[in-house]
Image (cartoon, rainbow, N blue to C red):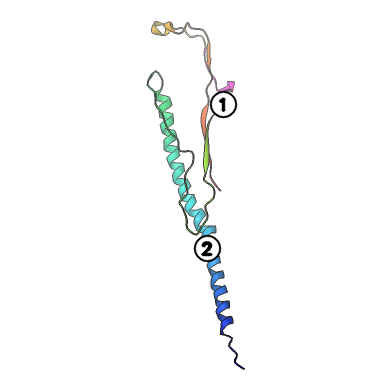
Amino acid sequence: MFRDDRGQSIQIGAVLLFGALVIALAGYQAFVVPQQNERLEFSHSQTVQDELQDLRNAFVSATGDASRRSVSVTLGTRYPDRIFAVNPGPPSGSLRTAGTTDPGVAVSIENARASGETGDFWDGTDRVYSTGSVVYRPNYNV
């Protein structure tokens, strides 16, 4: 009697539109979000470099200085909130000393004499001081 095929074309159009939307969101998640996160991680890396330079300067200026100084190093960063996309977990990092027990990087003072005020706290005997480095390792979501 009466045939109406219009309902099927509307449903097919809705499914195709939904599929195009899913593909667009998947492309955004796969290409745009990592690119934005990469820029943020690079900016964080530059900030950490500056903070590690401040830490180095604090070490160098600490000789003979009785005052205390604190330096903070931002180990991780925060990704921006996204409405339709998903961020990876928050990146972290670690800051540690390395080589402090390695005798190959120890500083030794031998065959030296203490004179003047130095003789008040050192009698000229051989001394070995452990040394090492501070290592920062970022844990970005690659």
Q: In this figure, which residue is indicated by the disc labeled 2?
A: 25
Answer with mark 2 or mark 1, whichever residue precedes in sequence: 2
- Whether the residues at callouts 2 and 1 have beta carbons within 8 Å, the answer is no
Q: Residue at image x 62%, y 94%?
A: 1
Percent from the top left, x then y, of residue 117?
39, 7
Percent from the top left, x then y, of residue 20?
54, 70
Mark 1, Cα crowd under 10 Å, few <14 / some 14-19 / many 20+, is some
Q: Is residue 67 left or right of residue 16?
A: left
Q: Secondary structure at mark 1?
A: loop
Q: CA distance from mark 2 to mark 1?
A: 48 Å
All told, the count of numbered labels is: 2
Q: Amino acid at mark 2?
A: Leu
For residue 100: magenta? Answer: yes
Q: Which residues are magenta?
A: 99-109
Q: Secondary structure at mark 2?
A: helix
Name above or below for residue 63 compared with residue 79: above
Percent from the top left, x then y, of residue 124?
48, 7
Of residues 28 and 55, the one drawn nearer to the viewer in this rendering: 28
Q: Residue at image x 42%, y 6%?
A: 120
Q: Amino acid at mark 1?
A: Gly
Q: In this figure, which residue is indicated by the disc labeled 1?
A: 99
Percent from the top left, x then y, of residue 123?
47, 5
Please name which of the two marks, 2 or 1, marks the residue nearer to the observer: 2
Name above or below for residue 122 compared with residue 101: above
For residue 86: magenta? Answer: no
Which residue extends farthest bottom?
Answer: 1
Of residues 126 and 8, the one drawn nearer to the viewer in this rendering: 8
Say the numbered circle drawn on residue 76: none
